Structure formats: structure tokens, C-alpha cells
Image (tube, coloured by chain):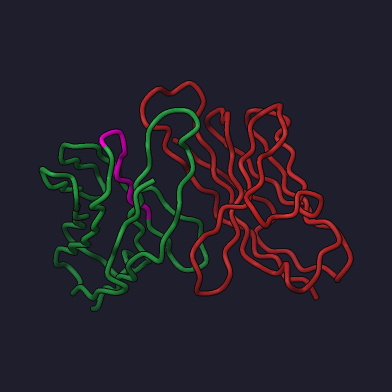
Amino acid sequence: GAVVSQHPSRVICKSGTSVKIECRSLDFQATTMFWYRQFPKKSLMLMATSNEGSKATYEQGVEKDKFLINHASLTLSTLTVTSAHPEDSSFYICSAIQAGRHSTDTQYFGPGTRLTVL
Amino acid sequence: DAKTTQPPSMDCAEGRAANLPCNHSTISGNEYVYWYRQIHSQGPQYIIHGLKNNETNEMASLIITEDRKSSTLILPHATLRDTAVYYCIVRASGAGSYQLTFGKGTKLSVIP
């Protein structure tokens, strides 16, 4: 149980275009999802926290108009990188917390999406 | 959340136990110790977590000292597939405390 998927796993796009990444909790309902970014040989950096049905909370330094997050259902959150530039090339990873649990709310991570902007 | 300190790298012979230490001397009473690992080019994988007592599951054992200022993750019989970066993270429980702060972790290399 507690499986999180991401689509696509890899994407290459031209500079100036927008890219949408999907994050799905396959076997549980997720009240909260998170989006992280990881540059080569670096650790994960939290970008934003997304709660179902409400606006995402962005970490300091993350542009909310550039990284659009939608969490429309308890099993799906999307991250759209708008007007992508080469410096947005990175490994994007989502995670989800299972709804309704009252213990320690373990985060389960997706496999990640490798974005390359040409 | 409390800060953790881990060695940057460790080697372990295949088939032997891998013992990964973590210091969290400023941990608070309501903070859990979580362990995740990240194999190259994949998302982090949850391993185990604990509060006070030692914990064991099908993947690993977690030993927390009585004063809770440090812990050790034990992989009882390391295999080559256990080669990964292991992250020790301290996090409070309850709503509003879900965020995980990833440090640099320990790069474990399992050697044939």
C-alpha cells in the first residue's frame, strides 16, 4: 500500500513552453501533497505544500506564478512549470500523506519527474 | 524541527549488517525520527520511524538511545540494492508539522 505515481517520468521541452506534471496517490486518499525539487548531487528542497481544495503554500523563494499547483481531488495534484527556462531543469518529486490517519502521517514519495528544458 | 547530523558516507560489505548513525541532540519530546533512502534517480523511499522505543520492520531496525539524542538505522544483511543515500529526519507529529527537511544524508555503498 501507500503507492504514489508521477507522470511523466521524463520530459524534454523547449524554452518558453509550459509543462504539467501529475502526482497521484494510487491506493489511498491524500489530504496533503508536497512538491520538491532536486538539483544534481543536492538534497531535496521543498517547493510547496498542497492541501486538497485549497491554495498551495509556497516556500520562500519559490515563484507561485511560475510553479502552478492544483490539488483538485484527494488522489491528484498537478505541478505546472510555466514559461520554462533551462534553469528550471531539475528532478521534481511529489509526496503524499494519507488522509484519516492519526498516527505520525508518514509521507510517501513518487518516483520523480526529470525535466529538461532546452 | 530538530537538526540531524549524519556521516557523509559509509561502506559496508555485502551480507554484513549496515549500521547508520544519526545525531539529533536537540530533539523535542513530540518529535519522531524518520528514515528514508534515495536510490539514484528515484524518489525517496520510506524505511522506518520511531519516537522512543526501538522499532523493526521488514526493511530495517531503528535503535533510539534512551535520551533520544541519537539513533542508529540497522540494515541486517546489506545487499547491493541497498546502495543509496540514507536520510535521518526529525519531525513533530500532528497537523501542521508534516514537512520534512532533508539534509545531506549518508551515502551508503555496499561492496561485493
Of residues B93 and B1, which is closer to you in this image? B1
Q: Is A116 included in the stretch rendered in magenta?
A: no
Look at the picture and state if A65 lies above or below A30: below
Which quarter of the image is occupied by the C terminus of chain A? bottom right
Q: At x 33% / y 51%, what residue is drawn? A: B35
Q: Quadrant of residue A29?
A: top right
Look at the picture and state if B73 lies above or below A24: below
Q: Where is residue A91? Give x, y as percent.
A: 61, 64
Q: Quadrant of residue A69?
A: top right
Q: At x 38% / y 42%, what residue is drawn? A: B91
Which quarter of the image is occupied by the N terminus of chain A? top left
Identify the chain drawn in green.
B
Q: Count of labels shown?
A: 0
Specify the farthest residue to the left. B66
> Overall secondary structure of the magenta stretch?
strand
Q: At x 44% / y 57%, what residue is drawn? A: B102
Q: At x 50% / y 41%, what residue is drawn? A: A3
Specify the farthest residue to the bottom. B112
Is residue B65 rendered to the left or right of residue A44? Answer: left
Specify the farthest residue to the front. B26
Query: Which color has been applied to chain A in this rendered view?
Result: red
Magenta stretch in the rendered image: B29-36
